Amino acid sequence: MAHLLEAKNITKRFGGLTAVDDVSFYVDEGEVVAFVGDNGAGKSTLIKIISGVHKPDIGEIFLDGEKIHIGSPIDAINYGIETIYQDLALAENMDVPSNIFLGRESTKKIFGVVPVVNHEHMMRESHKVLDRLDIDIPSLKSNIRNLSGGQRQAVAISRSIYWKARVLIMDEPTAALGIAEQKKVLELVSSLRTQGIAIIIISHQMYDVFSVADRIIVMRRGIKAGERLVKNTTSEEIVSLIVGAESVEKRSQ
């Protein structure tokens, strides 16, 4: 059976630097895969290839077993691959529905001729997706700048899910959040898993990784240094793979 998303033999060079060197991985529906590694390990470059920011020099990407070409972020979105970066890409001077529909606003026609933004529809749909994910934001009319870090993260996730993401890539989803909000975001990730969303997380937080991930892929100096099932490994082993104390792919999962 084909994997939901699979990358094979991905290589990316920037001049004389090989940022990603012959890396393969997959993620299935309802699975959380975490990428870990030091800064410069290649994990962010690899994810940017999947999300259409960079084009690989070598390698192929498959969706449901069919080879696809991701030449831009729009291509990725059209394939149901959504990425939430650390900056969240939210418009802070706009309210929640406007951000969920940002760039894809719903419209209606006045007098059957003049198109205007359909704020009522956007508000109703925003309530639906937030309720589906059990996200509590007291007032959807609040500007994003007035929301907490966890609420902003929730809005960014809701936007991706509303637009039918099948694969959700999250870059450091709990960075700069307090402990209570970190817990809420991790609970949201677990909820998304139960709804069949495939999730890829980049994180430096071992607690986060072991709380929600099914598998951990360790990147080091552009290569895949190891891959482990969370249930079969420890944080000590993962750290050893990150720093190179344990040989690459010393044992199976």
Image (spheres, rainbow, N blue to C red):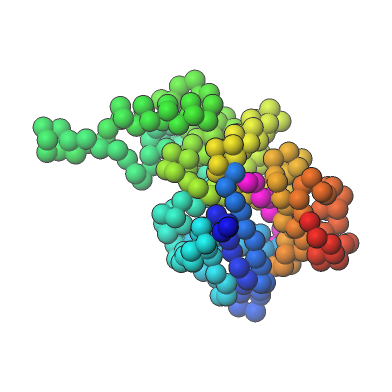
Q: Is residue 104 magenta?
A: no
Q: Residue at x 51, y 24 (%)?
A: 137
Q: Quadrant of residue 115?
A: top left
Whole-percent x and y of residue 19? 65, 69
Whole-percent x and y of residue 251? 84, 62
Quadrant including the N terminus: bottom right
* Picture layout, residue 104 above or below residue 228: above
Q: Residue at x 72, y 67 (%)?
A: 223
Whole-percent x and y of residue 238? 81, 53
Residue 190: in sight, yes or no? yes
Q: Residue at x 34, y 44 (%)?
A: 104
Task: Report the front residue among 227 and 28.
Answer: 28
Quadrant including the C terminus: bottom right
Question: From which residue to which does the magenta span run?
Answer: 31-40
Q: Quadrant of residue 206?
A: top right
Q: Is residue 98 left or right of residue 214?
A: left
Q: Residue at x 69, y 40 (%)?
A: 212
